Image (tube, rainbow, N blue to C red):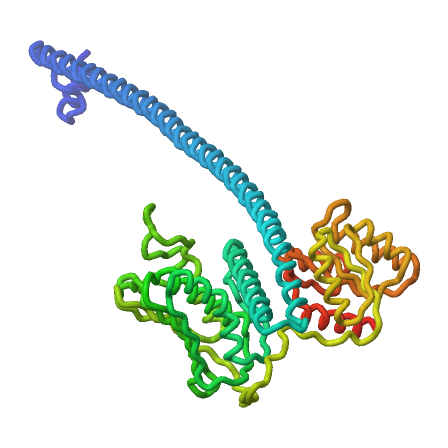
Amino acid sequence: MQRMRKRRLRDLSLGLVPPATPASAIGDVDAIKGAINGLRAGEGRTLAIRVQTLATAYAASRWALIVGSVLGLAFALFIVGRTILQLTQERRLLLASATALETALQGAQAAERAKVRFLANMSHEMRTPLNGVVGLSEALSRRDLPPEERELVDGIRFSAATLDHLIGDLLALARGQAPHDEPHAVGEFQLQPTLAAIARPFMTQAKAKALTFEVEVVEDGDVEGDAEAVAQILACLLSNAIKFTARGGVRLTAEALGDDRYRFAVADTGEGFDQGFKAQLFDTFSQIDDSETRQHGGAGLGLALASRVVAALGGTLDAHSTPGVGSTFFFDIPLKDLGREPAAGAETPAAGATNEVEAPLCILIVDDNATNRKVLETILDQVGAAWVSVEDGRQAVEAARGQAFAAILMDIQMPVMDGLTATREIRKLEREAGRAMAPIVIVSANCQPEQVASGKEAGAQRHLGKPVGAQVLIETLNDVLAEAA
């Protein structure tokens, strides 16, 4: 016991044994432990709350992410769907536009085909009777006629030629082409008798209105140029001058300007016009008075066509006028001066004189119009050529089957069988029989470019438009016969 007490004292002295704790100290320790445990419990609850908050925030953010993704996907799908819908609608609109354009194109093509057919029919219906006037008047002009009768025949010829060119220019305008792209026919002519023949039909009109009418040619002589085009221009100017002149007179003059240029002028004492109207004077369908109560008729095409013809000849049509006093229309064009003065008392050669054909021939004439056949027959008679005349394409094929002709003059628009079909049948017949091809010359009022091309495709060598003159016809026959020889 003593020993244990000593050991305890030693341990105390060495600090190995804690001193005895009083009861109050033990109570403080318990309080501290309780506080610590309370703190630990509070921290646990706080931590649990924080963890719960974080879990809730995570869950909320996850749902927000999911909802956002769904909304974004839905918006994207909406945009894609809307774009597809717009593209579909645009495609439908494009298809509808394409269909409308195709329908419009088909309508325009149908209208163009109808226009071509209409123009072909109009050309045929107008030029077929005109061919009789031109051809028969030419035949008369080659006869020995008294001077007064020759003047009448020449007036008919020039009037018919002017009408023919006017019809051609009107049809060109209807096709949307410029009229008179090329000169009609360049040749030699004498100024004085040519202008007299041009003016003769208008002298009667002037006389009926008690107007004076004068024709003056300064330095008459032979020139080379397009007499028919000059006649067409002057006919328009003279017609207007007489139409718009109530009293006084009309004067036609021609004079040489030098350097192979000539000036033609038509002056009148008519109504006149002011400078304001001059700006539109040569426009198509332009008229001084276009009201319903106008005194003078007309379509407003004459001066526009005349201006284009003058331009095609290398000149310019112009005018000056004073209202109530009168007007003067004039143009300068190149005409080659041949330097020959007309012989005193010499007669002008009969217009339309033709050359002889180069050899005795038998020509097949194919035309459904009796007057046109008569024109061709008369021309061939005057040059010493034999002929056979038939009325339609089928008769032409049968005639060619039984006889070889030196050449064939073929119309296009005929009953029973048209000229193009007959041309193909004759070419087929010649191939089967081993015969040489007879030159075929289309002589038709259907002379639009596509019709000329169709004639060549069928096997024709030439295409002459009605009305056809004797000189042109005989020259063409000589050309095709020389090629076939």
Q: Determine whether, in the image, residue 284 is placed left or right of residue 8.
A: right
The quarter of the image holding the C terminus is: bottom right
Q: Residue at x 77, y 47 (%)?
A: 417
Residue 444's image quarter?
bottom right
Q: Determine whether, in the image, residue 278 is placed left or right of residue 83.
A: left
Which residue ends up furthest to the left in the rendered image? 24
Front in this rendered view, residue 231 or 197:
197
Q: Determine whether, in the image, residue 149 is placed left or right of residue 429.
A: left
Q: Residue at x 54, y 39 (%)?
A: 103
Which residue ends up furthest to the right in the rendered image? 433
Measuring from the top left, give residue 433's x and y in whole percent: 92, 58
User: Can you say whether 192 is above or below 248 in the image?
Assistant: below
Q: Residue at x 89, y 55 (%)?
A: 401
**Is residue 331 visible in the rendered structure shown here?**
no
Front in this rendered view, residue 418 or 386:
386
Q: Determine whether, in the image, residue 267 is placed left or right of residue 152.
A: left
Measuring from the top left, give residue 458's x and y in whole percent: 76, 57
User: Can you say whether 2 is above or below 176 in the image?
Assistant: above
Measuring from the top left, give residue 258's x and y in whole percent: 44, 87
User: Can you say whether 385 is above or below 9 in the image?
Assistant: below
Front in this rendered view, residue 330 or 51:
330
Measuring from the top left, give residue 370's x and y in whole percent: 72, 53
Residue 373's image quarter?
bottom right
**Is residue 235 visible in the rendered structure shown here?**
yes
Q: Residue at x 89, y 59 (%)?
A: 431
The quarter of the image holding the N terminus is: top left
